[in-house]
Amino acid sequence: MEPDVEPHREPDAQPDMTRRGADDGGAAGPGAARPSGLPDGRPALETLLDTALRGRADDPVARTRAVAAFRTARDSGAHTARTRRRDDWRPKDRRGPNRSLRAVFAVLLAGLTLGGVAFAAVGPITHENAGRRDASAAPSSTGAPDRFSASPPPASPTAPGATSAPGGPSGRPPQANDTEAHCRAYASVRGRGNALDARAWQRLVTAAGGEDEVEAFCAGQLAAQDGTKGAKGANGAAGAGSPGKADGTRVPGSPAATRPGKSGSGR
Amino acid sequence: MGQGGEPRRAQPHDAELGVAVARAQEGDEVAFAAAYRIVQPGLLGYLRGIVGDDAEDVASDAWLEIARDLGRFRGDGAGFRGWTATIARHRALDHLRRLRVRPRGTALEQDALDLPGRHSTQDEALESLSTEYALELVAGLPRDQAEAVLLRVVVGLDGPAAARVLGKRPGAVRTSAHRGLKRLARQLGVAGVTDEESRTLGESG
């Protein structure tokens, strides 16, 4: 059963006795003690302890059991198991670079992700606001505060006509575009991060009439905007020449015309 | 195996152990037996310091796990010592929990209290430090010191490896081993301590 290990135990532990005589003298008895010369250069105490405490590997039953377990594991395929972290005892310098490299990549990736989220949440809004500041001067006589005091869009989001009504034909609706951008950004960051704490979102919440309403509100808004965009694209010749941006974050038409330089430089 | 004797010191056999482990991982059971023979003495010595007379049983359990998980292991001979020591330690702690015995058995503790302060002369200590007496001395140490000393001296691990086995910082383990050895040296009246200076001095003398 165990041909290669057998010879060690058959001579009645004789090899082990010689081994102990030579190496484990301290444990075997005073007669076989090592001289205090300490040829391996270790302090006397460590040599003593090692000599005295070191066990023996000559128990055939224990060894047979271990080898049998090895055979069972090998034959059952257990030795193909995946290496866990605690099984990796390779020297640090060999696995160090890999790990630090991985760490660097992880940090970079996390940074990019967070940055992307932050940009997605903040970018379009500031853009809209920047463009809006000068654009709103024309249609609204009340000036800057109107951004906050402007009447919220109609509560019935399914009416596309009503959405564009406040702005009239001369310009884009004062709030519809902001709201639309907010809604799109809201859709993109929903459930993640603290972006909804920002002031812009507070405005969106106010416009929607409550935090719980935002989703339904936005759904209606976006549907409405898409609808009007489609409509305008169909008879776009009547309005402005530009049919709108591909991403649809902004309504095509006169607002673009009123701030051509600003929107160009703002980007 | 063809080796002339049991490994006295861990390091000289690490290359051989590494080869044996690598071959065992490829399915060679003779190589596994060779690795067993190299590692087992140190493991047993360490386990004796933790679980006393149950060391053989615990080591047997540990080897079942080692044999089963061998394919997972990555590393060289020195790494294998650390890996196996970690497994043995977990089995030993499990064993102690099962028995609801405190890490250092009261019997050993009591014996340690009854020990004579030191051996009369260094020569006598050098010649007659029996396994039982050494165990009693080690058992008289605080647990962390005993384990650190055993892992360093008997299992043959270096500082970082011993620290990994114990789940502690290398500095803490180094301190524990140093204190433990110093205390043992005092009890034995042996001049050997682990300071680098004294090691050089002892060697030159």
Image (cartoon, rainbow, N blue to C red):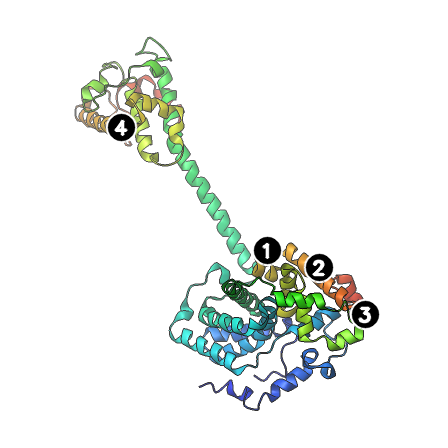
The chain ID associated with circle 4 is A
Q: Which residue does the numbered mark 4 point to in the structure image?
A: A218
Among the two numbered marks 2 and 1 on one chain, the one whose residue lies closer to the N terminus: 1
User: What residue is shown at x 27% (from left), y 31% (from top)?
Assistant: A246
Residue beneath disc 2: B179
User: Which chain is home to disc 3?
Assistant: B
Do badges 3 and 1 share one subunit? Answer: yes
Mark linked to residue B168: 1
- Marks 3 and 2 sit apart, C-alpha to C-alpha, by 24 Å
* Residue B163 showing in the rendered view: yes
Q: CA distance from mark 1 to mark 4?
A: 55 Å
Residue holding disc 3: B204
**Tag 3, which secondary structure?**
helix
Chain under callout 2:
B
Q: Nearer the viewer, residue A181 or A262?
A: A181
Please give the name of the residue rendered at 63% of the width and 74% of the height, measured from the top-left corner: A54
Q: Earlier in the sequence, mark 3 or mark 1?
A: 1
Along the horizontal axis of the image, is A29 left or right of B3? right
Kindly report which numbered mark, 3 or 1, lies closer to the viewer in this rendering. Answer: 1
Task: Determine the secondary structure under disc 4.
Answer: helix
Does residue A78 sit above or below B143 in this rendering?
below
Q: Is residue A142 above or below residue A251?
A: above
Mark 1 or mark 4: which is in front? 1
Q: Residue at x 68, y 71 (%)?
A: B134
Residue A4 tag number: none
